[in-house]
Image (spheres, rainbow, N blue to C red):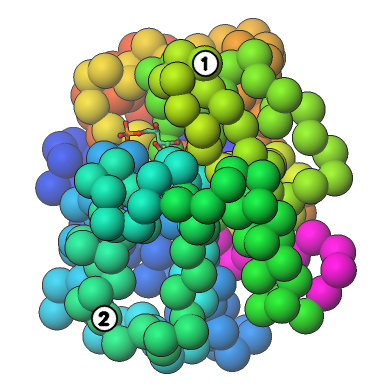
Amino acid sequence: MPKLTTFPDPAAFAVGAAELIVEIAAAAVAARGRFTVALAGGGTPQPVYARLAAPAFAGRIAWDRTDVFFGDERCVPPDDERSNFRMAREALLAHVPLRPDGVHRIRGEDDPASAALAYEQELRRVFHRETVPALDLVCLGLGDNGHTASLFPGTASLHERERWMVPQYVEALASWRVTATAPLINAARHVVFLVAGAGKADVLARVLVGAYEPDVLPAQLVQPSRGEVRWLVDAAAAARLPSGFAGDREPR
Ligand code: 6PG
């Protein structure tokens, strides 16, 4: 069942999110000897990743037993300022002792269809399995139009039932993305949405308490079959939720 936690301000949000990621990582390493995580792109997670890289948190994750993946990528080279990999590398990955082969980036510089296929193969290789893997944690953001990862309203990728990663042309952005699909996201052990800022208040309320219309609000597709969803939000993003909703409780 999804749970929502509201933090009073952006700093508390970043610390709270970093704390939850550390907890999930520790539990995964204790249970299975490694931690597999898919990072979100966009701007919201950047301060969370920066916290994780800071001394107070960095020493609390077994980076040498961690495999870092990405939930989506913009189809640009890895040093482009729009690259999700670049953001994560600069905020976090370059500052912690990950194994060189512990970072699995989506090749945004390649043809999108080939990059999506290659990433599925990489997941198969790392997880040694042909069936959909259960990542320990998938971090997600929420776009102000209800998208998450690069699952955008009205696009074909929303209806994907087999593939784990797909290429998607996004008309509204006039650009290609490569995105994890609902089958991959919903196989995760934990999914954590990171949502901050007043610009997300309307869409957050629609996603959590509005009608179920995933073609319009793709974030509603996220319903892990066995795992749990946590929504970490700041007070500004929580402003349009019904009163009494902005605590630690189940949104649906
Ligand atoms: C991306 C994302 C995307 C993002 C949302 C929210 O590549 O842009 O992964 O799903 O999480 O668009 O982005 P912000 O955090 O920047 O608002």
Return the x and y of residue 39 as percentages of the image width and height: 44, 56
Q: Which element type, helix, strand or loop, lies under badge 2?
A: loop
The boundaries of the magenta stretch are 129-137
Q: Quadrant of residue 178?
A: top right
Give the vertical position of 154 relative to 236 (above or below).
above
Amino acid type of the residue tagged 1 in the rendering: Glu
Q: Which element type, helix, strand or loop, lies under badge 1?
A: helix
Amino acid type of the residue tagged 2 in the rendering: Val
Decide if residue 68 is on the left or right side of residue 189: left
Nearest the viewer among 79 and 49 is 79
Residue 181 among magenta residues: no
Badge 2 density bin: few <14, some 14–19, many ≥20, Cα 10 Å = some
Give the vertical position of 252 relative to 84 (above or below).
above
> At x 65% / y 20%, what residue is drawn?
155
Quadrant (top left, top right, bottom left, bottom right) of the C terminus:
top right
Q: Which residue is mark 1?
A: 171
Nearest the viewer among 227 and 128 is 128
Nearest the viewer among 10 and 75 is 75
Return the x and y of residue 6 as percentages of the image width and height: 32, 37
Return the x and y of residue 43 as percentages of the image width and height: 26, 40
Give the vertical position of 141 relative to 26 (above or below).
above
Q: Nearer the viewer, mark 2 or mark 1?
A: 1
Q: Which residue is mark 2?
A: 96
Residue 136 among magenta residues: yes
- Confirm whether residue 216 shows in the render: yes
Q: Which mark is residue 202?
A: none
| Quarter, ligand 1 | top left
Query: How far is mark 2 from mark 1, CA to CA?
Result: 37 Å
